[in-house]
Amino acid sequence: MCSRYELNTTNLEHVSSRFSAKAQSGVPALPEIRPTNRVPVIKPGGHVEMLHWGLEHPWNSKTLINARSETLAQKKTFIPLLENRCLVPASAYFEWRKNAKQKIKTRIAPVDQDLMAFAGLFDDDRFTIITCAPSPAIAHIHGRMPVILERHYEQDWLTEVKPFAQVSKMLTPYPNGALLAQEVTRPPQYDLFV
């Protein structure tokens, strides 16, 4: 789940304004963010920092790009990070739906806004995106989705004085019908190289 997302803006001031955050400088538009990329994340206090996507651990050669909301409070890896909460700005995320032997890339974005915030946890200069069960309207695409915080919950998620137990109720599927899923078609020239 959620191994690609986009932040389709070149204007970090737009990100700062949307999330009431403070940013130092701009970043290039990021049409397809991949694990280990360095991207803007909003930390408590409203500071935008460039962090790498994926937590590193000595026992796992792969970076941990996602964390299941249902087990966060039981996993030794995530328990120390439950108070290190962040917002991950995005304009869409990508999933691959299986159709027989074919994988179909799908872009999923909010219907009514240009930027959304995934719930995340951070450790030093790295972060992970929290996932949950999908909204019913997109469940046929994939069995998980990133936790997209409703706008009125974003600042509560960042608030350090609220313990994880109090904000964990926010880790739910985005409201049904509030996301638009569109298949991404490959450019015609792509087939020449396959």
Image (cartoon, rainbow, N blue to C red):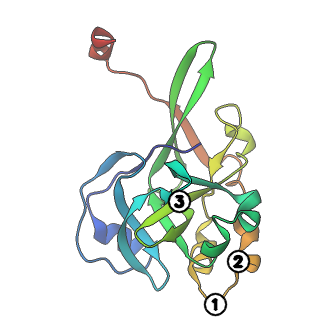
Q: Residue 37, can we see it?
A: yes
Name the residue carrying label 1: 161
**Viewer-closest of 25 and 79:** 79
Q: Residue at x 56, y 41 (%)?
A: 180
Q: Which mark is residue 164?
A: 2
Question: Can residue 117 be seen in this snapshot?
Answer: no
Estimate the spatial distance between the alpha carbons at disc 3 and disc 2, rounded to whole Å: 16 Å
Residue positioned most to the top: 192
Q: How busy is the neighbourhood of tag 1: few (under 14 within 10 Å), some, or many (20 plus)? A: few
Q: Earlier in the sequence, mark 1 or mark 3?
A: 3
Residue farthest front in this picture: 59
Front label number (1 vs 3): 3
Residue 171 image point, x, y percent: 70, 63
Q: Amino acid at mark 2?
A: Phe
Where does the image place residue 163, in percent across and percent down from the top left?
70, 83
Q: Secondary structure at mark 1?
A: loop
Left or right of 170: which side holds 64? left
> In terms of depth relative to the viewer, which is nearer, 110 or 6?
6
Describe residue 127's horizontal placement relative to residue 157 as left or right. left
- Amino acid beneath label 1: Val
Q: At 59% from the left edge and 12% from the top edge, which residue is drawn?
A: 101
Number of numbered discs present?
A: 3
Percent across and percent down for residue 45 are 46, 86
Q: Which quadrant is home to the C terminus?
A: top left
Distance, label 2 to label 1, CA atoms, is 9 Å
Kind of element beneath mark 2: helix
Looking at the rendering, in which quadrant would you find the N terminus? Answer: top right
- CA gap between label 1 and label 3 equals 21 Å
Q: Which mark is residue 128?
A: 3
